[in-house]
Image (cartoon, coloured by chain):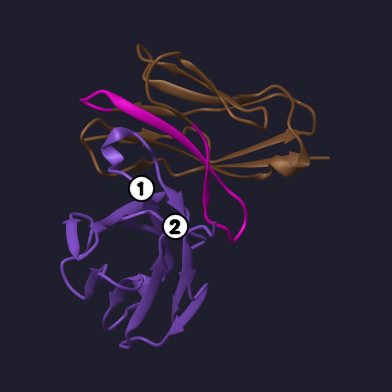
Chain colours: A purple, B brown
Amino acid sequence: NAGVMQNPRHLVRRRGQEARLRCSPMKGHSHVYWYRQLPEEGLKFMVYLQKENIIDESGMPKERFSAEFPKEGPSILRIQQVVRGDSAAYFCASSPISPDTGYGYTFGSGTRLTVV
Amino acid sequence: AQSVTQLDSQVPVFEEAPVELRCNYSSSVSVYLFWYVQYPNQGLQLLLKYLSGSTLVESINGFEAEFNKSQTSFHLRKPSVHISDTAEYFCAVTGAGSYQLTFGKGTKLSVIP
């Protein structure tokens, strides 16, 4: 049973370009979460999605960032017009049931975005 | 609102010595507590969690953590560390009815041969 798959593992973008990060949850998991890890910081919640629905995007920056989890295919985190401050590790996680039960997540290996 | 404080950013310890990684939290609701481990350039792996019941929880590789409600702590301990335990450890909290995990800033454990 494959874990949470994220690609690419490393992504380099020039300032002003778009970054698209993909996440395939574990088989049977319909809840997906995105977290960002800045250098020397813990992970910060960005967004929680279920198939075709954004449940909680309270951690997403108001501009340039968007996320989707379509009926078919992986979840996508999209960052438009990247700036150097977007450089971070972005982690996706999934769970089979709602996290407010305390079930916990399974994390992917992350995408490390570098903006040059 | 919830918060997590990991008091030590780095902990060096000799192989086979005991270790304690400290974690304190604050929350206005009943909590679920987690410890995750992150090896270099990898994702986070769940080490152990407290949901309810016994305040002492154990992992399969010898770590244990004790939930102390009065001190709002969830410290992680291991009686004898191995080189392979070198990693970064994150404490996290979520509350009943919450979707979000709130993480501490992490503690880097370095095991010295």
Category of crowding for the residue at label 1, using alpha-carbon neighbours closer than 10 angstroms: few (below 14), some (14–19), many (at least 20): some
The chain identifier of the residue carrying mark 1 reads A
Any magenta on residue B29? Answer: yes
The residue lying at 38 percent from left, 74 percent from top is A21
- Residues A78 and A15: in front is A78
Residue B42 to residue B12: above or below:
below
Position of residue A115 relative to residue B39, above or below, is below
Residue B72 in view, yes or no: yes
Q: Is residue A71 left or right of residue A110?
A: left
Residue A43 position within the rendered picture, expressed as x and y whole percent measured from the top left? 39, 51
What segment is highlighted magenta in the picture?
Answer: B27-48
Residue A28 marker: none
Residue shown at 26% from the left, 34% from the top: B2
Circle 2: element type: loop
Displayed quadrant of residue A27: bottom left
Tell me which amino acid carries mark 2.
Met
Have a look at marks 1 and 2 and say if they share a chain: yes
Q: Earlier in the sequence, mark 1 or mark 2?
A: 2
Residue sitting at x 29%, y 76%: A79
| Residue under numbered circle 1 | A96
Q: Which mark is residue A26?
A: 2
Q: Which quarter of the figure is the C terminus of chain A placed in?
A: bottom left
- Which amino acid is tagged 1? Pro
Residue A111 visible in rendering: no
The image shows residue A97, relative to residue A91, as above or below, that is: above
Quadrant where the N terminus of chain A sits is bottom right
| Residue found 38% across the figure and 15% down from its top | B71
Q: Are marks 1 and 2 in contact (CB under 8 Å)?
A: yes
Q: Would you say B61 lies left or right of B47 here?
A: right
Residue A14 % position (x, y): 40, 88
